Amino acid sequence: MSDATGPDKFDGPTPDNALRQANKTSGPMLAADGKPLKKSLSRALRRQKLRALMLIAPLLIFVLVSFIAPIADMLFRSVENQIVSDTMPRTTEVLGAWDGQDLPPEEAFEAAYYDLYIAAEQRIHTRLGSRLNYELTGASSLFRKSGRGLDDIGEVYQDQFEDLDENWDEPMPWIELMGDPDWLAEQQEWAADEEGRQPRFELREGIDEILPRSAAQYAIFADFTQRVEEDNLLEEEPWSAVHTALYQDLASGDVSSYSGPRADMLQAAAALVASPEFETVAFIDGFEEIDEDWIEPPIWRTIKLYSPNYTSGYFLNSIDMQLTPDGAEARPENEQIYMLLFKRTLFMSLVITLSCILLGYPVAYILSNLPMRTANLLMILVLLPFWTSLLVRTSAWKVMLQQQGVINDVLVWIGLVADEQRLTMINNQFGTIVAMTHILLPFMILPMYSVMSTIPPSYVRAAKSLGATNWTTFWRVYFPQSIPGIGAGSILVFILSIGYYITPEIVGGTTGTFISNRIAYHISSSLNWGLAAALGTILLAVVLLLYWAYDRIVGIDNVKLG
Amino acid sequence: MKLTKTLLASTALTVSAGAVAAQDMADSMTLVSWGGAYQRSQDEAYVKPYLEMHPDVSVSWDESSNEAVARLRAMNEAGNITWDLVDVVAADAIRLCDEGLAMEYDPEDLLAEGDDGTSAEDDFGDLIVSDCFIPQIVYSTTVGYRTDLVGDTAPTDICALFDLEAYPGKRALERRPINNMEWALYCDGVAKDEIYDVLETPEGQDRALAKLDSIKDETVWWSAGADTPQLLADGEVIMGSTYNGRLFSVIEEQDQPVGMLWDMQVFDLDGWIIPTGLSDESLARVKDFVMFATDTQRLADQAKYISYGPARQSSAPLVGEHAELGIEMAPHMPTDPANAENTLLYNYEFWADYRDDIDAKFQSWLAQ
């Protein structure tokens, strides 16, 4: 991997040198067709490069699409956190100004009411609940409950308006009040045969000044009905959040000067709202009715803490810390696990790599020194486990190592171990190391073998004929030449074992499991993909760091696969 | 909620329209289940009879239920749902429903009435634990023991698990907090109806872990349902928790010296969910199949092949003999009154909330 083709090392007529030469001469050197040589040469070179690129393009695109992009996407999830601000945009905005002490102001409850109402209609509030449940236990059922309970707030108003005038629960009066007349004509035309696309709802001019909240809520309702539900808006009565907004508008504004369509109806409603009998619910009381957790600060703090679009929360979780309003803090001791697992994964991978070297080196040595026929035959034995299912091999180790297993039985039979004190060799670190060493051994033997078979036997003979002992010959002459094979095998085995998860899952018990087992759990069971992505990113970073360190210490040139 | 009503009304319309125009139904279905004996029981009881009635339909099985949650989410993100009907445990159904990956349905609409005329909603009763979950069977997690290794007095209650003096030897427990924490608290003297109240508090969780600590060194932690039967058969453990169907197969089909406890069995449910985002034709076919596959007779038929209780009350009297062994299946149902004297119902809502939290503590405790 040296840069033998570098321009500085060759004086011959390489393209680079020709270019340099062309530069040195005073006038531009011309090619046969009269164009400057420099230009036509670089064009030829460019064409060559392009052709080369075209050749590898399929592979490049394949790798990009099927490998790099998914990994990048997965890694991106470790910081991505848009779900909170997407689902509760108003709430997160209001909470931005909140100091995090006591309870947030009434506006936060109001914002949360409208946000959650829409989210519940879209059925995405539970998704946010499970997201926040990773940070605050109980958020999941709190959101599930709230989706059902929010109607109770709005129905207070809806019922009263309806009792006053049934029109408040009919689609058309609302449309006349809120909708633009031109749009209404188009919508009616469309409704005749329901062919094609529904004309998008438009607010009537000026209505958003008189009834700002109701107009906004009605527009959201109309958009949802038309685009998501694809129902005819003319036949849908608005949901109760619109009635709540209407109450708020009537309570805070003056509609006596309004003279548009349905003015009587609106003014009667305003009179009703102004009258002392009108029943109201403060948002905070409504939320308290749903669940008392809403009038405790933790849920609000969690929402505020996770309102930014990007969060460091997952990464903090994956190193046994947590995000708090006062910054990062260590988790309580009885919840710490990831650092332990990272350390254990690295330690056990090292042990597995070392035992693979110890077991694999003699095998590779013998293989490379035997006649071809015998070597090939033995090679099949090395490869045989490769052709067996991983699960079968791992389960076979279970049969061998368990307390009533083959090895223990033999030990008891020859009297080395008492029957009551059979050895525990599985469901612990030992079992994992044994099983994984066996499974990964071919990855160590193959590169070692291919490097060793290129070492000329004459070197060893020469060393011996010069008087070296067997040991000196091996240690000073043979071994240094086999190091590239050890290096390649070690990197393969180490990196493979760091990410292994089936074998530790089956034979690892409690002390032999790896970080990858937790990653798998978060991917497939808890669905906390953000945390899984953060753990995976850290693992990737650790591997790259170790690779770098290896390069610095041993040198990556010193690795050969053959 | 008014919107829901309109929604349901429109689904009802689709269904009735689908029933009339049979040609609008897809002619193939992909069902997802757990593989093994359980999937075979579904194939025998539901799918084969259905295919006899509809010879032009083809059904393929995908044995991916244990990773269904993650796979469905991935499919949903890719916008390409290739599964039509997925068999999951109730806890997963709740999670899928929360994530919007499973379709909400109306029992009156999708499910047939019971044979005795009770409405589907009453027939299934409380077992419809989520708006998306179509219950099929009741199974239980319970404890099996080696009759020849536990001494002269066979264990009769769950707390034998924690009694190392009377029953020395290894135990097998699942490598997750669910069930273990409840049993630990129960055997530590907590009344059955207070278990979840206690488990809610950090002190209660510590108390449960402390109880489990007393047998930690003597426990093999399993993660696959087949582990405990194997460990029992090999004599690796003297007792261990597993699903009642697995124990039935070890005892009755494989004739191993194993006995089982019904005391404090934890009831759990398994059933179907319909993924969201199916095409209209696929949905119509799936609904037609579900209507058939969850009726009283079909659920009772399933018990001929596996010892899990049918989720419909009206199916219980119809449970007959095992198809191959010819033994009466009713006494082997977890729901049989004789077996159900002291049981615990898995608290779905509690675990949906506390699963992440308690699991972190449990795994941290395990790794120490």
Image (cartoon, coloured by chain):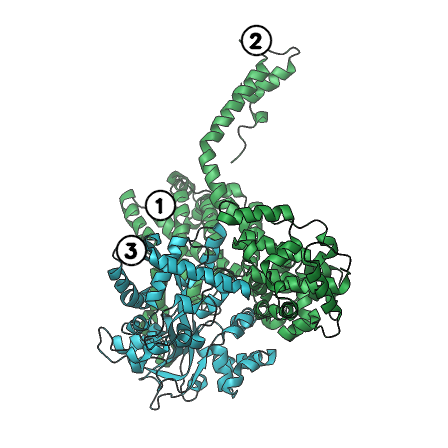
Q: Nearer the viewer, residue B194 or B257?
A: B194
Q: Quadrant of residue B155?
A: bottom left
Q: Where residue A385 appears, x then y in whole percent?
A: 33, 55
Q: Secondary structure at mark 2?
A: loop
Q: Is residue A308 visible?
A: no
Q: Where residue A224 appears, x then y in whole percent?
A: 57, 55
Q: CA distance from mark 1 to mark 3?
A: 59 Å
Q: Secondary structure at mark 1?
A: helix
As drawn, which residue projects farthest toward the bottom?
B153
Any idea which chain is the cyan one in this picture? B
Q: CA distance from mark 1 to mark 2?
A: 60 Å
**Colour seen for chain A:** green
Pointers 3 and 2 in contact (C-beta within 8 Å): no
* Marks 1, 3 in one chain: no
Residue that label 1 marks: A368
Q: Is residue B362 left or right of residue A135?
A: left
- Residue type highlighted by circle 1: Ser
Residue that label 2 marks: A34
Q: The C terminus of chain B lies in which quarter of the figure? A: bottom right
Subunit ID for the residue under disc 2: A
* Marks 3, 2 in one chain: no
> Mark 1 or mark 2, which has the lower sequence index?
2
* Marks 1, 2 in one chain: yes
Q: Is residue B135 visible?
A: yes
Other-residue count near label 2 (Cα within 10 Å), few / some / many at <14 / 14–19 / ≥20? few
Q: Nearer the viewer, residue A112 or A506?
A: A112
Q: Quadrant of residue A538?
A: bottom right
Q: Which numbered circle lies on residue B57? A: 3
Q: Quadrant of residue A283?
A: bottom right
